[in-house]
């Protein structure tokens, strides 16, 4: 008897891609500009260098490279994509950069839009895209995480400028009616009452238009962060949300192949590994080379580990994003890779 097709499909993670700017800025180079040094940055954060978008690149061009890379790995025609989600807080166009990426990739049948949730943006977008696939609305999705925080740091503030870099990463997902489920569970959280720890706020600048009528002038303040508060938040909430996720999915942390966390500080990654009593080497990290690339960190790290063969088809990965909002989340995923 033929099987009745289910409207609820599984979702497979099939392709990854990434792109980073060519310009690199080392800790020593930064130390010649602001009152900091390589030893402080490396020991307090694990960061050794970061990439900055240069004059011949844009965030959109990096997104297109990362997206095209993921599409090629998947063996897809761009026209077969139904959805493009761009996770970013720093689009080249405030109205959204996803439509331009859709056009440049030739994904003419895809609906494309931006989603903003700071450093949690990629995780939130992955889960959002998966819902469209699981409910049968779409079959193929490209999720891109990208940010250009170099535009929004105060380059004279040593407390923030040493932390961030630019980059883009991408992941392709498609529906599957086999048992190869790629998204095994997720948890998402927001606590806006603690949002003042980390902000990229509009400048308060008003101009008078007519008598009694004024308007806001566009423009943003540089990133403001209370590092210690955000650190405490991360080391408390990330293990807690992962613990809930693993409990709800009946997963023993020892059965995870990898943890793939937002890359903000090596000390946070190590603290999470210790909390679950897993070796530090099981928590993927490329923080040393790129710093905190916000919405890009998770797909950038995923792509690197897929390409160098650390992540293999069938591997089980617990991933977690956290940052401004405050927002945080976790997902248990299984990498399938292309057929
Ligand atoms: O992506 C969103 C999520 N973001 C995060 O998860 C970031 C979480 N926070 C952190 O990773 C850490 O709090 C930081 C790396 C931002 C800061 O590290 P910390 O150990 O919390 O340093 P601190 O802010 O407590 O500062 C300690 C000292 C201070 O000097 P005094 O007051 O003790 O004399 C700072 O002025 O280190 C000084 N300092 C620096 N010194 C050299 C701060 N930044 C620097 C620097 N170079 N770049």
Image (tube, rainbow, N blue to C red):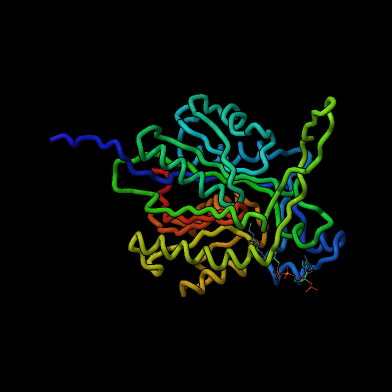
Q: Residue 223, position in %: x, y?
A: 73, 52
Question: Looking at the image, can residue 337 be seen?
Answer: yes
Residue 98 place in picture, x, y as percent: 59, 33
Q: Observer-nearest residue: 299 or 155?
A: 155
| Residue 298 drawn at (x, y percent) | 55, 53
Residue at left 67%, top 55%? 196
Q: Where's ligand 1: which quadrant?
A: bottom right
Residue at the spot 41% in from the left edge and 41% down from the top edge:
131
Q: Nearer the viewer, residue 228 or 310?
A: 228
Residue 288 occupies quadrant: bottom right
Identify the residue at image location x=70%, y=62%.
226
Would you place residue 273 above or below residue 11 in this image? below
Q: Quadrant of residue 46?
A: bottom right
Does 144 sit above or below residue 252? above
> How many circles with numbers are drawn on the protein?
0
What residue lies at 46% left-to-right and 40% top-to-bottom?
129
Left or right of 229: which side holds 158? right
Which of the 4 image quadrants contains residue 235?
bottom right
Q: Residue furthest left?
A: 1
Camera-side residue of 260 and 229: 229
> Left or right of 262: which side holds 159?
right
């Amino acid at each position: 008897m033929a099987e009745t097709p289910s409207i609820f499909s599984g979702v497979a993670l099939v392709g990854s891609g990434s792109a980073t700017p060519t310009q690199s800025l080392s800790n020593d180079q930064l130390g010649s500009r602001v009152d900091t040094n390589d030893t402080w940055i490396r020991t307090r954060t694990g960061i050794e260098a970061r990439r900055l978008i240069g004059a011949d690149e844009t965030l959109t061009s990096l997104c297109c490279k990362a997206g095209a890379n993921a599409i090629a790995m998947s063996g897809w025609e761009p026209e077969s994509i139904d959805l493009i989600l761009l996770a970013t807080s720093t689009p080249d166009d405030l109205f959204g950069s996803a439509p331009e990426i859709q056009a440049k990739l030739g994904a003419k049948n895809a609906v494309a839009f931006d989603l903003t949730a700071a450093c949690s943006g990629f995780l939130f977008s992955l889960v959002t895209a998966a819902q469209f696939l699981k409910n049968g609305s779409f079959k193929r999705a490209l999720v891109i995480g990208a940010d250009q925080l170099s535009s929004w740091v105060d380059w004279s503030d040593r407390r923030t400028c040493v932390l961030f870099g630019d980059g883009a990463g991408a992941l392709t997902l498609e529906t599957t009616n086999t048992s190869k489920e790629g998204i095994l569970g997720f948890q998402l959280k927001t606590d806006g009452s603690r949002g003042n720890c980390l902000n990229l706020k509009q400048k308060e600048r008003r101009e008078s238009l007519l008598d009694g009528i004024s308007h806001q002038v566009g423009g943003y303040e540089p990133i403001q962060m209370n590092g210690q508060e955000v650190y405490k938040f991360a080391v408390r909430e990330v293990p807690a949300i992962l613990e809930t996720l693993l409990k709800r999915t009946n997963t023993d942390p020892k059965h995870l192949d990898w943890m793939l966390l937002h890359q903000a500080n090596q000390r946070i990654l190590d603290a999470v590994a210790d909390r679950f009593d897993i070796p530090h080497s099981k928590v993927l990290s490329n923080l040393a080379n790129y710093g905190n690339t916000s919405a890009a960190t998770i797909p950038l790290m995923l792509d690197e580990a897929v390409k160098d063969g650390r992540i293999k088809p069938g591997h089980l990965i617990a991933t977690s994003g956290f940052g401004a909002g405050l927002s945080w989340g976790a997902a248990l995923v299984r990498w399938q890779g292309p057929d």
